[in-house]
Amino acid sequence: MSSPPTQLQVVLADMVTRCCLGSCCSSRDYQMLKVEEVPEMFQEPYIYSGYRQVDRPWSYYLRSIFMLHNESINVWTHSLGMFSVLYSLLACLRNLDLQSENHARCVLFFGVCCLVNLALSAIAHLFHSKSRWHHFAFLFLDYMGVSFFIFGSGVVSMFVCSSKPFHNLFSSWFLPANVFLSWFAFFACVYAKVKLAYNNSHRKGMILAGVVSQAVVIALPTAWRLVECVLEPTCELYHLSHLIIMFFMLIMCGVTFGCHVPESLWPGHFDILGHGHQWFHVTAVLAMMTQMWAIDVDLNLDQRAKQLQQPGAGELLVFLVILVVIESATVVYYMRSVTDTYSEASSQSLLGKDTQVDYRDAVNTEGDSQDLLSKIIKSVEMDELHGKKQTEITEKHKEE
Ligand SMILES: [Zn+2]
């Protein structure tokens, strides 16, 4: 049994559902929907309200950056987070010479990957409700950003902060391996989204397994220094406390992403403010800032980076372009599948209705026809409910 909402939650919900945002009160734009009023693919576990309307003009989603809904904080945390990470990057670069030091360019490269990741995430959270097709497209863009972050992290892990013996052994083939590992993490996210879209725990489990396993491999060059320190009697672990804090923050990213806390404990109470994905966003920004700080400490404490051989900026860009190309090909492949499925499903006038069935219904070809039919009926009912709600809002707007 969930406890009744607090006064603050009632006020927030009221602001969302009654559109109490200044002079814009009369606009239907500010009418947010309850979970049962949006198609299933947009429903988030334990989030019961604050959903934006689907199939509205692009300007509606752009303006929604100033509205209060269940994606507002997700957009703002990564938009503002970009400035925090940029500040950390500039602080880290202040003592480095980008003209002559290759390791400085590796740090800059990593910083740009972080910023691109945050920008793509903010864009995805802002626009993914546009339609079912766009929901997939923007989430794939978000996953691309994550893979760029993994790729950039790998570059600094191997070429700036690495254990020297580890670097000597593996650095020559690290960049192609980094491309493959980053792509694989991306592929795991895309595959989980397409094939497990309606089983949230399985989907999140696969995304975590894909991303974390690749991230662990990429972290190894730096993490190996902790192992060396433990094996070396004269080494004190607290000298590497900056690396321990950095790894702790990265682990916290995985924890906050995987757990729907606190909303799973008090469903419906954190729809707008405080749900787990918002904490994940904040943790991700803090983790990036911690990485910048750890790199800065490392560069100031010892001359390690100067003893390591780094790739040039051109080489880094070539491998990044290769990553972008193979990820774009993956997106094109799966988006064609999404588009084909919609067209095919729409042409199945099983019920004599001109309606788009849910993407889930068509991709799940393993189910029997009876199961497919029941899913289509459910999807049509959901669309009708959604349509009714939109009509109600329009009529209400006209009355005003
Ligand atoms: Zn996010």
Image: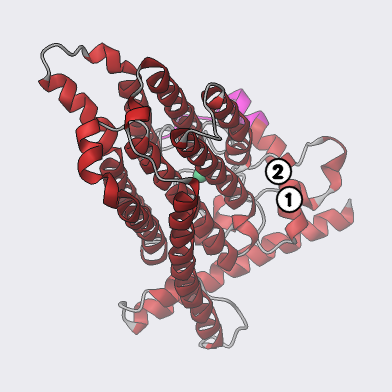
Q: Residue furthest front?
A: 100
Q: Which residue is mark 1?
A: 62
Query: Of 308 and 357, which appears nearest the observer?
Result: 308
Query: Of 306 and 11, which appears nearest the observer?
Result: 306
Q: Residue 150's x, y, as percent?
A: 40, 45
**Position above or below: 234 against 132:** above
Res. 335 in view: yes
* Residue at disc 1, CB closer than 8 Å to ligand 1: no
Q: Which residue is mark 2?
A: 65
Type of amino acid under label 1: Leu
Residue 66: quarter of image: top right
> Does 75 appear in magenta?
no
Seen in the image, is 260 located left or right of residue 128? left
Type of amino acid under label 2: Ile
Q: Crowdedness of circle 2 by 10 Å Cα count: few (<14), some, many (20+)?
A: some
Q: Which residue is pictured at 14% across the width and 11% down the height?
A: 234
* Labels 2 and 1 touching (C-beta < 8 A): yes
**Position above or below: 230 against 387:** above
Quadrant housing the N terminus: top left
Q: Residue 122's x, y, as percent?
A: 60, 45
Q: Which residues make up the magenta segment?
A: 1-11
Q: Crowdedness of circle 1 by 10 Å Cα count: few (<14), some, many (20+)?
A: few
